[in-house]
Amino acid sequence: MATHHVHAVLPDEPEKATLEGKNKILGFWLFLGGETVLFGSLFATFIALRDQTNGGPSSQQLFDMPLVAIATLLLLTSSLTSVFAVLAMHKKNLKQVQAWLTVTVLLGLGFLGLEIYEFMHYYHEGHKISSSAFGSAFYTLVGFHGGHVLFGILWIVTLQLAAVKKGLTVVTAPKFYVASLYWHFIDVVWVFIFTVVYLMGMIGGKVG
Amino acid sequence: MSAHASHAPKRSGLWDWLTTVDHKKIAILYLIAGGLFFLAGGIEALLIRLQLMYPELSVVGAKTFNELITMHGTTMIFLAVMPVIFALMNAVVPLQIGARDVAFPFVNALGFWLFFFGGVLLNTSWFLGGAPDAGWTSYTTLALNQFSGRGIDFYVLGLQIAGLGTLIGGINFLVTIINMRAPGMTFMRMPLFTWTSFVTSGLILFAFPAITVGLVLLMFDRLFGGNFFNPDAGGNILIWQHLFWIFGHPEVYILILPAFGIISEVVSTFSKKRLFGYSSMVFATALIGFLGFMVWAHHMFTTGMGPIANTLFGLATMLIAVPTGIKIFNWLFTMWGGQIRFTTANLFAVGFIPTFTIGGMTGVMLAIPPADYQYHDSYFVVAHFHYVIVGGLVFGLFAGLYYWWPKMFGKMLNETLGKWNFWTFFVGFHLTFFPQHFLGLMGMPRRVFTYLAGQGLELGNFISTIGVFGMSIGTILFLVNVAVTAKSGKRAPADPWDGRTLEWSIPSPPPEYNFAQTPLVRGLDALWVEKMAGNKGMTPAEPLGSIHMPSGSFLPFVMSVGLFIAGFGFMYHNYVVVVIGLAINFACMLLRSLTDDPGYHIEPDEIEEKGVKA
């Protein structure tokens, strides 16, 4: 059985140095597989209902592409900075890890701020969860993603605070690694939301 | 990371059970909780059959009847057979692969408590304004606010919490089987029960998120004014049916595959022969798992999907009969020429084969779309799925319980009582469900609380109800057997059945660390290989050394209570309660993230003391 040895020198790829770390990473990949089905179901629901506006505003009337483009840019960049954090971890440089994660979190907060602003704007336009099937599907899909972003931010901040005391060890490294996997995943989901919800919502009229 | 405690912190009695992360104890928790829900679901079934014993009875009345059929189905599927499957997986899989524990012991405990509190939440509905009454499939629009009461909210929230527990349990077993196998235990040397648990866990991972989304959408419709299933505002009721069955069909394979695994182990052991066609069994298991995701719309033939979709889903469904047939023949060929011992476990296994085959054949009949228009929503369907779920899965679970009981509890179940248990249950089962095929063909619809006299339905219904008494007697005999065994059962040796796989190489019940030394696996049926080589036990793969164990934790229990509280908050629109419940949950997650578990060590001298002759 692998145990928590005190490593005088942190091994290379510290996230995979222990069986616990390997288990955590594999388990998390599998969890993301389940999350894919979860978002897949939400996407399918959205595609089925996106033209059912029930007399309310349609996606062409609502969406403000510059705002969504900025949000996309923020989130895609944050995925890159989380890669930098993992690269810094492989160089065993905790200070750099912390710095890049802080940038990641700030970008995530920026994204979240824009999303909240966007939702409030839509709400005042009469686009609510209860106004139409389109509204229900839109807020559920995009809101689920937003909830994931919020959870990711809280998670990464927790890990950052814990690492101040604990440093970079074979116990904390898998946690950072897994959190960055999660962050990439919500970034990938956003790419699909941007395409399916916003781009497909802008072009054409009724499809289905 | 600092100094390890060298002894387990002493926990005893109830506190030990509430905080345990030991897979063997979690198995027992799953078994007890699943068993209690099984009894609840069984009593519901008894009441259903009493209501239908004669025409136009009013034993329970229409409203209660709807609640009973809904709760019977939901309880049996989600809260009874799933947990008993998880009980056996927890008790057996780590032992069969030569592991000291599962990959995530904490998550394992969390999975149990989430299932438990989800199930309790669902069942509190009986006392809080009425149980859900829209059928276990809870189709919209029937399940929306206009047509159904608060019971559906209990269904929606209870199943979300329980489903989360099942999902993380599935992930746990996948990682355990991939990463924790003993040296030499390659994938193609894994016992078939481990293989089927592996494929089942994969199905859980990809099927449960779909029902979770369906339940979330239904919750939004019912509690927050959503319009997913409200046709007046552009909603689409078929989305629920698709999401439900994208989960629901793989779910039936989630249930039956572990039973296939149990039957394979039991038949092989009690025929004293290696399982016939091991590789084809593994292949068939994987193929059933794959095809299981391709057939969900055969539950929806009558919704008007059109001839092309109906044909494709019908053909895909019939295709599943091929790998299933491979399995049936492999079991028969395993017995062929074997030294067969008809122990209770083997009786259930042998009883399983023809019974399940009948269920499989009616399944192929139902897969023919034009014929299904006749069978749909009739008792023929009820007969079919009870033949596969009771005649298949429950027989398999009984076989597994009689087979592994000595390993789990260290005592042998009484064989005489066991045989009475089998015969009463077996005869009762066929009496109950065989006539239902014909009731269905004669036009009796399912889910209707009564029927008229003079339509030829009396005899079949009467026989069916009599059969339930047989099954009830069988179940009671099992409980009596458990009680007798607990009081004065024979102590079980390590290897009571002349077993073939790793779990029989260690004491019954196993010590908390399972294997004092991780075994070296040298072939399929690892223990049998050593027996044939004339060795006393397994060859160790490591020297005797200090064993690291995870500490118990109360957090899984508290986290699940948090979600339980939040669930009530959602139902009663009391957001203070929601916040309190979620805060408890997230506080536990934070605590878990911040505190590292150093665990404790069991030293070699303690292993000598506790070991071998436990």
Image (cartoon, rainbow, N blue to C red):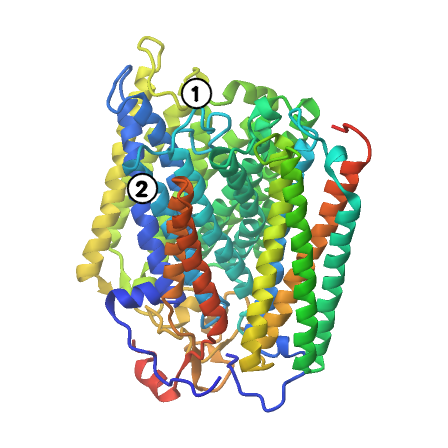
Q: Chain of mark 2?
A: B
- Residues packed near mark 1 inside 10 Å, few (<14), some (14 to 19) or many (20 plus): many
Return the residue nearer the eye: B341 or A147: A147
User: Looking at the picture, how far across and down is residue B281, in whole percent?
Assistant: 57, 52
User: Looking at the picture, how far across and down is residue B213, in whole percent?
Assistant: 56, 42
Q: Which mark is residue B440?
A: 1
Q: Which residue is mark 2?
A: B124
Residue B537 picture quarter: bottom left
Q: Is residue A110 left or right of residue B127?
A: right
Q: Is residue B176 left or right of residue A206?
A: left
Q: Chain of mark 1?
A: B
Question: At 41% from the left edge and 46% from the top edge, which residue is drawn?
Answer: B567
Question: At 60% from the left edge and 30% from the top edge, which residue is drawn?
Answer: A131
- A23 is higher (above) or lower (below) than B567: below
Return the residue nearer the eye: B415 or A7: A7
Residue A2, visible in the rendered structure: yes
